[in-house]
Structures are given as C-alpha cells and as structure tokens.
Image (tube, rainbow, N blue to C red):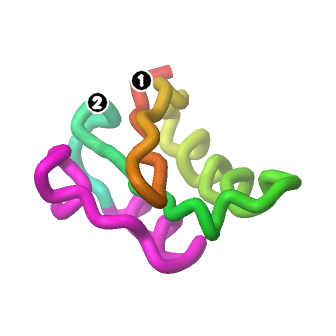
C-alpha cells in the first residue's frame, strides 16, 4: 500500500480516493497513513469530514498529522 511509510507516501487526488483507501485497507490503523493535499483541506472541513466518517466507521481515531510541503499526512489509532 503506497501510504504506509514516509518514504513512499503519495497524496490522494480526491475525497473519493481517500474514502476508498480507508475502506480497502486491510491492516491496523497504526500502519495506515493518509496524505491529503492542501488543496483538499477546505476552510469548512467538509472534505475531511467525509473521509473522517469512513475512518470512524472502521473504529479508528485520528492520531495526529505531520505537515509536508503541499500536503498533510494523517495517522490513526484504534478507538
């Protein structure tokens, strides 16, 4: 999975892609990272709310992020 390690992280190109990655991931939340480009971080937070619904449906909780050049890499943990 291209989102698992810092060396291979690749930002998603759409909210739909982010939701699909969350739903398809087969490992635990601690090994999942989601890179979201700054362009998808809207002022209201609607895009991340949509992705967040898929995260919460899996029983995962946000566990911080790191800011990279042009995107954020979000991490998760078990609820």
- Picture disc at residue 69: none
- SS for dot 1: strand
Is 4 part of what is drawn in magenta? yes
Q: Nearer the viewer, mark 2 or mark 1?
A: 2
Query: Which residue of the protein is positioned furthest toward the front in this rendering?
Result: 69
In contact (CB < 8 Å): disc 2 and disc 1: yes
Residue 16 x/y as whole percent: 56, 77
Q: Nearer the viewer, residue 53 or 33?
A: 33
Q: Nearer the viewer, residue 58 or 48?
A: 48
- Picture disc at residue 78: 1
Residue shown at 54% from the left, 77% from the top: 14
| Badge 1 density bin: few <14, some 14–19, many ≥20, Cα 10 Å | few
Residue shown at 30% from the left, 56% from the top: 25
Residue stretch in magenta = 1-24
Residue shown at 54% from the left, 45% from the top: 55
Q: Is residue 76 left or right of residue 4?
A: right
Residue 44 x/y as whole percent: 87, 54
Q: Is residue 1 above or below residue 6?
A: below
Is 9 part of what is drawn in magenta? yes
The residue carrying mark 2 is 30
């Amino acid at each position: 999975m291209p989102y698992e390690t810092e060396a291979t992280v690749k930002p998603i190109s759409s909210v739909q892609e982010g939701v699909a990655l969350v739903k398809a991931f087969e490992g635990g939340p601690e090994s999942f990272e989601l890179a979201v480009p700054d362009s998808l971080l809207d002022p209201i937070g609607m895009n991340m709310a949509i992705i967040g619904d898929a995260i919460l449906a899996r029983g995962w909780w946000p566990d911080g992020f790191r800011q990279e050049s042009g995107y954020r890499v979000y991490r998760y943990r078990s609820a």
